[in-house]
Image: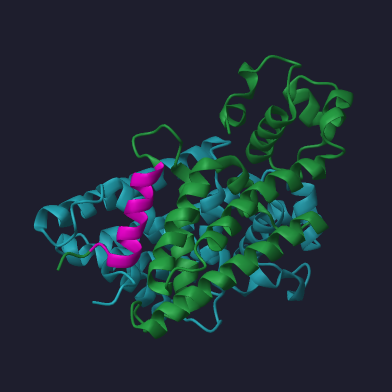
Chain colours: A green, B cyan
Amino acid sequence: MSQSGATEPARRGRPGYDRRGLLDASVAVFNESGYDATSVAALATRLGLSKAALYHHFSSKEEILETALGEALDGLEGVLADTRTVVPSERLAAVLQGAVRVLAAHLPSVTLLLRVRGNSDVERRALERRRAFDQEVTGIVRAAQREGAVRADVDASVATRLLFGMVNSLVEWYRPGGAEDADALAGDVLTVALDGLRTR
Amino acid sequence: MSQSGATEPARRGRPGYDRRGLLDASVAVFNESGYDATSVAALATRLGLSKAALYHHFSSKEEILETALGEALDGLEGVLADTRTVVPSERLAAVLQGAVRVLAAHLPSVTLLLRVRGNSDVERRALERRRAFDQEVTGIVRAAQREGAVRADVDASVATRLLFGMVNSLVEWYRPGGAEDADALAGDVLTVALDGLRTR
């Protein structure tokens, strides 16, 4: 799926957005100017569209938000679903790696997700799904601790928060096509998270 | 230094703010509603003050921002200044620990700093100081790699970003007085960052 609309909306032909292009371009505007601060009128103006053209693809600004957040959350939940048969110690590594890949592949929608503060039902449902994701990961860390594969002297929920603090911070600086590709980055995250920076 | 004004401005006597209390209360409002989105008039209303009372302590909204960002940056730069004679491997640990403590002690102003996007000269100067801080830490990681104390298979600037991604993410969930105190948290960050979660 092309992300190009998210980073260079101005280069797309106006008003030739399809639903995908409109979604990407809208998310880029939300990430730049803030979702709450962007009215439908302002969004349409920024995209060089009439409000009617925008409403042709989405019934409301909130539907755009919900679609983008759903994409990010579906990706993250997919990582959990795909690893349910893996033993906890290996599953933790697979989940971290998968989360970095989802973040890299859906950078704009994950960025939007991480800024959600719960100001509407759509946002609250997204936060609820994020919480469920975090809880399942905490359960994986706890199971890996019981297995003896993960150190038990860091609380599982603190460890999960620190790990995803590191993963989520990638939205601040990671840009697809840069010096570091997503797989190399996932490898670096796993190295720091699981083995630490100190040599032995 | 009391942080109480930052979390419970409403309990303070109106209009009895001193400069410190006004700063803390203003930063709390900026963090909640956004600095750009908060006009001086809106800020004064939220604090139950007249604009004149606000201007008694600060010449502008920007002076409040500059003071708060300066406090956060002074704290972080102080950690570097205090550790300049320490060998790189130990200095990296000391800097991470110090950064967690500064974040815990100045949570509202560090939160504000991390949201700065460079929309004014004050913000651009703050970003410049953050960049200089990051560069000095990257230099410490690189020196520790040369010393052989830190693994060399993760690029020093990626490692620094991942470490501070973890540290900075604490603003999302750490609250003073909670279950985890700042020193325990700094210990957990050091454990994950330097030793990793995997048992050996």
* Residue A120 appears in the picture as rendered: no
Residue at image position (34%, 35%) is A179
Find residue A26 and report its horizontal and vertical position in percent: 71, 33
Residue B128 placement: quadrant? top left
In the rendered image, the vertical position of residue A132 relative to residue A24, given as above or below: below
- Which quadrant of the figure contains the C terminus of chain B? bottom left
Q: Residue B181, relative to residue A108: is it above or below?
A: below
* Residue B142 in view: yes
* Number of marks in picture: 0
Q: Residue reaching furthest front?
A: A85
Q: Residue furthest top?
A: A13
Q: Residue at x 22, y 49 (%)?
A: B139
* Residue B134 image point, x, y percent: 34, 49
> Residue at 81% across / 40% down in the picture?
A61
| Outermost residue to the left | B147
Residue stretch rendered in magenta on the structure:
A182-197
Closest to the observer: A160 or B175?
A160
Majority secondary structure in the magenta region:
helix
Residue B31 location (% of width, % of height) = 64, 57
Q: Is residue B96 left or right of residue A157?
A: left
Q: Residue at x 52, y 41 (%)?
A: A105
Is A82 placed left or right of B133 in the picture? right
Reply yes or no: does residue A194 show up in magenta.
yes
B43 w.r.t. B17: above or below:
above
Residue A57, placed above or below residue A34 = above
- Residue B93: image location, x then y, percent: 26, 67
Q: Nearer the viewer, residue A23 or B24?
A: A23
Q: Is residue A77 part of the magenta span, yes or no?
A: no
